Each structure stands twice: as C-alpha cells, then as structure tokens.
Image (tube, coloured by chain):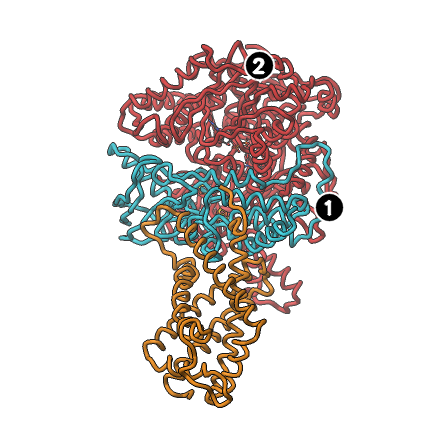
Chain colours: A cyan, B orange, C red
Amino acid sequence: MKLTLKIWRQAGPDAKGAMVDYPVSDVSEDMSFLEMLDVLNDKLVREGQQPIAFDHDCREGICGACSLFIDGRPHGPSRHITTCQLHMRKFKDGDVIHVEPWRAGAFPVIKDLVVDRGAFDRIQAAGGFVSVNTMGNLVDANAQPIPKLDSDKAFDAAACIGCGACVAACPNSSAMLFVAAKVSQYALLPQGRPEAKTRALNMVEQMDTEGFGNCTNIGACEIECPKDISLENIARLNREYLGAELSKE
Amino acid sequence: MARQGLFGSSLIKKYWMALTGLFLIGFLVAHATINAMIFFNDGGITFNEWAHFMGTNLIIRTVELVLFAGLILHVVDGLMLWRQNRAARPVDYAFAKHNANSKWYSRSMGILGTLILLFLIVHLWHFWVPSRNIVGSLEPYGSDAAGRENLFALMVQVFSNPAVVVVYVLGCFSLFWHLLHGFKSAFQSLGLNHRKYNGFIAFCGAAFSIIVPVLFAAMPVSMYLGWIK
Amino acid sequence: MSILDAKVPAGPIERKWSEHKDHIRLVNPANKRSIDIIVVGTGLAGASAAASLAEMGYNVKSFCYQDSSRRAHSIAAQGGINAAKNYPNDGDSVYRLFYDTLKGGDYRSREANTWRLAEVSASIIDQCVAQGVPFARDYGGLLDNRSFGGAQVSRTFYARGQTGQQLLLGAYSALMRQVGKGKVKMYDRHEMLDLVVVEGKARGIIARNLVTGELERHGAHAVLLCTGGYGNVFFLSTNAMGSNVTAAWKAHKRGAYMANPCYTQIHPTCIPVSGDHQSKLTLMSESLRNDGRIWVPKKLEDAKAIQEGKKKGSDIAEDDRDYYLERRYPSFGNLVPRDVASRAAKERCDAGFGVNRTGEAVYLDFASAIERYGKMEANVHHVENPSPEKIRELGMKVVSEKYGNLFDMYENIVGENPYVHAMKIYPAVHYTMGGLWVDYNLQSTVPGMYVLGEANFSDHGANRLGASALMQGLADGYFILPYTIADYVASDIRTGPIKTDTAEFVEAEKSVRERIDKFFNTKGSEPVDHFHKRLGKVMWEKCGMARNAKGLQEGIEEIRKIRDDFWANVRVPGKPNELNQELEKAGRVADFLELGELMCKDALNRNESCGGHFREEYQTEEGEALRDDENFAYVAAWEWTGEPGKDVMHKEELKFEALKLSQRSYK
Ligand SMILES: Cc1cc2nc3c(=O)[nH]c(=O)nc-3n(C[C@H](O)[C@H](O)[C@H](O)COP(=O)(O)OP(=O)(O)OC[C@H]3O[C@@H](n4cnc5c(N)ncnc54)[C@H](O)[C@@H]3O)c2cc1C
Ligand code: SF4
Ligand code: FES
C-alpha cells in the first residue's frame, strides 16, 4: 500500500520543528509500524537525507522505549499495544498518518520523535522502591503469604512499562497513572507498607516538581495505556496520599 | 519547584476540588428543593415562605457565607488547575484524536465551569442582589398573600423575557455536563473507587446530573409558558 | 597456548564458595567511600551489582545506552527464573539444579561456578520478594512454581509472562534508591566505546553521550561490564535492537579474552520471518511447549501443498502428521531442551517439510490441548455428553487463560488466529553462552575488569537451560561480585581518585574519535543495516544451528569481504556531535563484523558437537550431537593480537570432580 506520513522533524532540543510530508510506497501489511519507518529511513539515508530519529529497543512491547503519537493517538489506533507492536495491516492504502513525539513540558524533545523521559526516573528515585539492602540471609520468601488477589493487583500495577503514553494522552499532561501504578504496586504488598506514606508524598512531590499537569480524572490515560493500568490505581494513590497528608507530623 | 501550602501539591488541589464540588452539589440539592416549591403552583405562597426563612435565618445566612467561600475556592482552584495544565504542554499536537480516548465534557470542565460562573453572575444579579437589598430591593414586587416579600413575583417577571429563559436553559445545560463529569470525579479524587460500587456511583452521578438541571430548567420555562403563575 | 588459571578454590564443591567468601579480603566502610566503581549495563546483572555496591558504600557510576536504565534487555525475559527452593516438594535441591545446569550445558561449563549459581539461587527469590517483586502466587498466598524446558522438577518462579520485567524493575528500584541517595550517578543514553587500561589495570572507560555526541572520560578503580549478549550479530534475533557486543569487544581488544564465542542458543519457539523488512524476531514463551504439540506433515506432497497455500494444517489427517519430537524423544517429547528442539525443526524443514511460504516453519498445535482441557472442564462442570463444539469452547477458555496474552501477541504480529489455525514457529537466535572469559571471581584477564551476566561465558556451558539466565544475572550482581570485588579493590584504598588526563585516557579517547571520524569520512552509499543484514545471513547460514568445516571457512571469507565492503561503502549521515542513531548502529555493526569472524573461527576449532554448537561432521547415527570429551573438554579463550581473525587461543581445561561426564540423552 501507499501512504502519506506527516512526521514531526526537529533537528535538536532548541531547534524549531515542523511537520514534514513523506510519501511511502510498497508498505507490506506484515510490517510493524517501526519497520515501515526503518524502510523509510533506509531510503532517506540513501538519498542523502537525515533519517528520522525515534526511540525503540525491544520491539516487543515490554521495554517502553517506543513512543510515537500516531494518527492522533499515543501508540496509534489499537488498544493495549505499544507502537512497536502496531502492524501496518491496521491502515489502508492511501491513508495519511500523522506522527508526532509525546508532547509535554516535562518530556522535552531531544530530536525528531525522541523525547527525554528522565522525569520518570527521578520520580522513581524519589520513593519508588522498598528500602531493603542486598542480603544473603533475608527471611524466606514464603515466610509471609500474600493474598493472591492483592498480589495479582500489585502485578497489574507493576506491569507499567514507563512509556509515558499516559502523559502524552492526558490533555493535562499529568503523570498520575504512572505514579499511581508504582505507588499501588507497593501499597498492595506487605513489603511496601512500612514506607507507604513517605513514598506517596515524595513521589507526588517529585511529579509536581517535574512540571507535569494535574489529574482531573479525564481518563484518557487508562484508555491509551498499553498495559491496561486502571484508574483504580489513581484512586488508590489519592487515598494513600490523603491518609499520608492528614497524618503527616 | 515543589508546591506547598493550602493549594499545595496537585493532589491537595484535587481534594479541594472534590470537597468543594461535593459541597456545591449539596447546595444544589437544597436550592433545587426549595425552588421546586413553585411547582405547588399556589401563586408562590409556599415558595415565598421558604424563601423568607432562607433569607432571614441567621444560621442559613452564615452558611451562605461558607457557600460563597466554597464557590470561590472551587473557582480559584479550578483556574489554577486550568492554568497549570495548559502550561504543562507548551507545544500542542498538530493532530490529536481526543475523542478516541475521552469525553469532551471531561476535557472541558474549565470552559463549562466558566459558563456556569457567567450564568451565575447573571443569576445572582437577577435574584440574590435585589433580595439582599444590595442594589435595589424586592419592594416593587409588593407582598404576597401572606404578607411576605414577593420573590416569586420577581421570578415571574424575570422569566417573562425569552432571552433570559434561553440563558437559563443554557446555564442548566452547562451544569448538566459539568456535573456529569464532576459528580463521579469527586469520588475518584477522594479515592472512593471500588469495582463493586463504581457502577452505582456512576449511575447516581448520571441521574443527579440529569434530574437537577432539568428541574432547574423547568422553572424559567414553565413560568415563561405561563404554566406556573 | 597457555593454560588459564580460573582460581577455583580448593575443597569439596559444596564448601568452595562459603570458604572462599570467608577468606576474601574486606574493605572497611570508611575506605569503601574512596573507591569508585564503573558499572556498564543496567540489566539484571548491572542493576543488581550497582545497587548492591552502592549500598555497601562504594561510589558507583552506572551506564546504559537506553533512555532509562529500566529498559535494559532483561526486561524482555518472559518465562521465569529458576531457584532450588524445593517449595513444591518434588525432590529439588542445589545438587539437582547444579546437575541439570551442567548436563544441560553439555558439560562445557566450569563445575564450581555452576554449583555456586545453584547454591545462591534460593537467596535471589528471597531478595526479590523483599523488594516487592510480585511473583505468581497460589490461592494460599504462597509462591507458585512451574516446570520449564528441560527440567523434571518445578523450580521456576514466574510473574505471568513478564518475569524479566518484574525482576528488572525490582533491581531498577534498588538502583534508583541509590541514585536518590546520591550513591550511584546514573549515565543513561551513554554508550561505552572503549576500556581504559592503565599499568595493566582497568581504570576507566570512554563513553559517548548519545544526546550531545560528546566523548567523556570516566575513571574508576574497577570496571564492571554487564552489557548482555551479542545475539544481534545475526541481525535477526530475539534481542533488543540495541543489544551489542561493543563494550565487550572493546575490552577484548584491550586484553580481555573472549571465551567460547561460538556457543549460541537458538530458541525453538519464535515467530517465523515474514519478509525482508523484518527487524527482529519475537519469542513465543517456552511455556507453550508444555501444552502445544509440534508437528509437520509426514508426506512431502502435503508440505508442498501447504507451502503453496493450497492446503492448511487442519486439512492434514492425524495419521499424516509427524510429531517428530514425540517420535524421536519419547521420554521428553515436546519438552526437550532448546538446542535439541531447534535442531529437530531445522532438520525437518531442511528435508522439505516446512509449513509456510518459505518452508521455514513448523506447527505448534494446541488442538489436542484444547480438547483435553475441554473434556476436563466438562467433567468439572458436570456437562453431560458435551458436543465437540462445547468441548472446544471450554478448552479454548482454559488455553486462553494460560496463554491468552501470547496468543494475542501472535495474532497481532502474524494476523492469523492461533485458536483456529495452528501456530507456526521457527527457531531464532536468542542467547549467547559465549562471552568474556572470567575466573571464579568474575574477573576477566584484564585485572580490575569484571564481567557479569550474559556478557560473561561462565555458567551455562554450551547450552543454557530455560529460566537460568535471569538466575545467573542476579546471582552475579547481588550475591557474587559484591564479595569478590573487595579482594581486588582492597589494594586500592590509598590510590585516590583515578585521574583521567593521563596518556592512556588521551590515547583511548583519540582512538574512539578517529574511528567515529572514519565512519563519516567513508562517505559511501549503503546504510549500515545493509551490511548488518548481509552479515546476519552469513552467520545464520554458516555459523547457525548446524555448522561444518567447509561452511565455516566460507563464512570467514564472506565476513571478511563484507567487512572490507563496509569500510569502503558505508554511509553514516549527520554529524558526530548530535543524537545520531545511524552512527550508533555503525559502531555496533563494525564490531559485529569482527566478532562474527571469531565466532566462525571458534566453531571451526571445536571439532565436536556440544549443546548449541552442532558440527554436522560430529553426530551419532541418529543425528544427535556427538561430544568429544577427550579432546574438547576445555574453554576456548581467545586473545586479541591486533587484527580481526588473528586471535590466538588459550585453554582452560574443564575438570569435573563432582559429576561424571555422561552422554546427554533425552530419549
Ligand atoms: C526475549 C527473551 C526472553 C528471555 N526469557 C528468559 C527467561 O524466561 N528466563 C531466563 O532466565 N532468561 C531469559 N532470557 C535471557 C535473559 O533475559 C538475558 O540473558 C539476561 O536478562 C541478560 O541480562 P544482563 O544483565 O546480562 O544484560 P541485559 O539485560 O541485556 O543488559 C545489558 C545492559 O548493558 C547496556 N549496554 C550494552 N552495551 C552497552 C554499551 N556499549 N555501553 C553502555 N551500556 C551498554 C544496556 O544498556 C543494558 O543496560 C530471555 C532473553 C530474551 C531475549
Ligand atoms: S501507566 Fe501505562 S501509559 Fe503510563 S507509563 Fe505506565 S504503561 Fe505507559
Ligand atoms: S520498543 Fe520496547 S516497547 Fe516498543
């Protein structure tokens, strides 16, 4: 099939960017979206042009590196998949497809479609952990049973890949779903309880410091999250934080 | 920069939004109930009786101050959210399909709120200002059968203007959309989310968002059409 | 040829590690503060090591090429992690895990290392649970286990199909905790491009800031390479696009020996290649083999018809199907180890029985599992005389619960519903057992440089068992290196910070810069991938699942040609001082082009078949791998001598004291 791509090109962090048109032909429906971009880049390099920079690594939907706003939506039109899992059979001949980077002040563009998501790491460093050192003589892993339901819910939250689609989708550029997923995972497990309060307070503080917007419960994040992280987690964070804030000394 | 103080973090703002929102929802219930007294269609006797009580009771008048404070908090908090959220995305998408993942009214709470606020100013100008003798008074409308000042008569007069009726109906529409998001959103903000009860909350929210604005809208409309005299 | 000293401690195997630990020199807490350690890589090995070292008090600098350390390729591991916990009470023990690993690796790993791996495995699970890793649990709230390719006990811990992700996020959280405390300085989007050796010791690295293009010098008292495997030398593999050999290869050129580079694991259950545009291959979890049956048609004409699209798998009658694994290996059936399963698939496809357009695919069929589960469910729910449709429906539900996400993933990529049409799979490059040579302390032949995780050669011999790589990465990073490194850095407590303005750093930076300039100055016409694809094809055909002397010699010739062509005709657009992904790729491919030759050379040298290394000349009459313990029970460690292809080999003889060598049989 033949397609027209409208792609955001920006030479560097401080450069002015613009949407540029790229017609592509011979697109096979078995290609993934990123493979289609590979083919385009191959052509651009041969023609002496600059290839399009985009983040990607695992190409199987788990590392969270890929991050494109495709056809008006983060990770493209399909639900519960990442950009690298999107295949061209989702499009039809003649389609015009917009491709843009995540847009948020807290995710500045580095080049073309590549953005800096370092804010997520800093949020994690503010409290997204259990303070346990490496020890060869810890209690046995089975010493403390954990109700399956809690452990399953913790897993659901832990499935977040840190891709940032929630921020990209949110009209407020809020990072609540990401933060809530992490806070929830630990809040649901006994290992995470001792630090639950400080964790919620510190991670939210860092989130605000990074300049993400405020959550107003629009719910776009949940729909666009490739890992189906639920809004329930945001409610849990709201609860955890409220409790922490009220009992803070 | 970390955000501190009364409006502290983004979450504290969210709680204020939810709490003041729920408070205003409570007010709407009271307001709608009292105003619904006009539907007795008794020439405003019952309604004026309630209005008189509301206007003269010391407790109610004090609560009124709290109400205004709540409203202002809701508005100021909302404006702050709106401003910060705009600032969080300095460069917008060239092409975005927002409708694919969210409802327009959820994304437009600021606009809807502003419309409601504008409507509210008109509304206060129409009724609250004269009834509190701030500018003008209810005197020109005389007393009702029971000898109380006649707020009802003012209503009849205000709603005889079709333009006003349209503005009120539009105001109620804004309120409907605002509540449709706001009601359940308040619960979510306070962390009251549970798979078992979410459906119930959503149902109540939808029902409330329909019933209250419809009730309100019915007042100017029925007066204008002369059903209520 | 010299003999390498592995520094394996004396004593009975089960006491070696604890006694060794007891006699390692210690560094007191105050002195740890004056020791800097560079950790390259943030996968399971790197993140766990960096976090542990920082907790102990060392100053750590951590590097990865991704935009966040959380994205290291360990994140992609699906199946699980082994540990000798014996929770299911099925007779597992440290000894059995050791035995399975050594046997699974075809007796080509260092016995003492393998034992130690099994020994510390249980602690890994304790550690991860304490960190909040949400492993799968049963209804009683205790940890669940499953059995995994090649093992007869259930010792695999898992977190749905995302075990690697959960373990890595656990290690990442520990790492981030130290970053927050300022004990680890994180350098993401940084690629190590050279090792700096000062007076014979590893004292730092040259790294390129991938955002600005700047070359940076980083000094330290010790350098840890935890940079993962080099499967991408085949272009198509299940590895992440950025996985590379560059860090290891640069270290190799600075004196670290490369051990057994030809040992490559080809995973049997991957989604087949669909066209030239293919950029990577997707693994379908090994767990599918627990319920899926692998087959091809018995008759060549059926296979032909399927290849031409005239017939479908479902058109082939039961009697005309060849369940070749069950036929050849009755006792393990579809659960034989990976190397055996992969080779068997290749054998059938080479004979013309493949089941897709290119003839390079076999069926992985769930029809009988669906029926079996369906009948079971019907019994459980007291459905009287269930119709075949009802059975299918009930069975599909069970299969979907177990493998739903994998089935969805398959359908998404292939565009075919695997509940209706049998899945098609084919082997793909997955893991490299070979890697930098390390001694028992995980130290390479360059003093002060340690190698952890998939990047070293150590514990899996010629074939790795499923769920053992995660175990090794975390064992190395959490429980082995943090002890062994003390012995080395103990003598550095008075050294003071390593200066980076010395001649060695200047020279290393200069050589990196010259190479980058060379890429730009070549001004050829072909993009980097063009060469990578050509290299991959040669590697797959000549140094892949089956190898022979003639092919390997041809392979070496062809690789040389591609390498020459690369340096004459590659085109790298853009500038060096910006984010330049083509430049990144060029550097990696240039190194693969040298490594590829060494892999062929190593494969050519090893005149036997063992594990993932199958030399066609050395097989039994039934086509099974034929080992030569007399002549090849050694580790081949290659030393760089200045030019690609000119490496010389050193041997580490493998001695087996705890276990007697036996022929591996899964019949
Ligand atoms: C699809 C798939 C599924 C798997 N499933 C399983 C499983 O179920 N069970 C199991 O036990 N094993 C499994 N494995 C194998 C296992 O995941 C890996 O062997 C293991 O995770 C490797 O960990 P590592 O820490 O050594 O390296 P990696 O996780 O690969 O990390 C490498 C790190 O090095 C960095 N790096 C590399 N080069 C450079 C450089 N030049 N400069 C700077 N940084 C660099 C990278 O940024 C990264 O942080 C699987 C592998 C794959 C590919
Ligand atoms: S919550 Fe979902 S969308 Fe947001 S970062 Fe995590 S996986 Fe991505
Ligand atoms: S490239 Fe890893 S999730 Fe898409």
Within-10-Å neighbours for mark 1: few <14, some 14–19, many 20+: some
Along the viewing direction, whichever of C104 and A181 lies nearer the viewer: A181
Q: Is residue C29 above or below residue B35?
A: above
Q: Is residue C243 visible?
A: no
Image coords of residue A134 (percent x, y): 66, 32
Residue type at tag 1? Gln
Image coords of residue C420 (percent x, y): 48, 57
Along the viewing direction, whichever of B216 and A110 lies nearer the viewer: B216
Point out which mark residue C471 bears.
none
Q: Chain of mark 2?
A: C
B213 sits left or right of C618 in the view: left
The residue where tag 1 is placed is A144
Q: Is residue C20 visible?
A: yes
> What's the CA distance linking mark 2 and mark 1?
45 Å
A117 sits left or right of A53 in the view: right
Image coords of residue C555 (percent x, y): 40, 24
Query: Which residue is painted at 58% across and 46% down in the image?
Result: A201
C600 sits left or right of C401 in the view: left
The residue where tag 2 is placed is C496
C199 sits left or right of C578 in the view: right
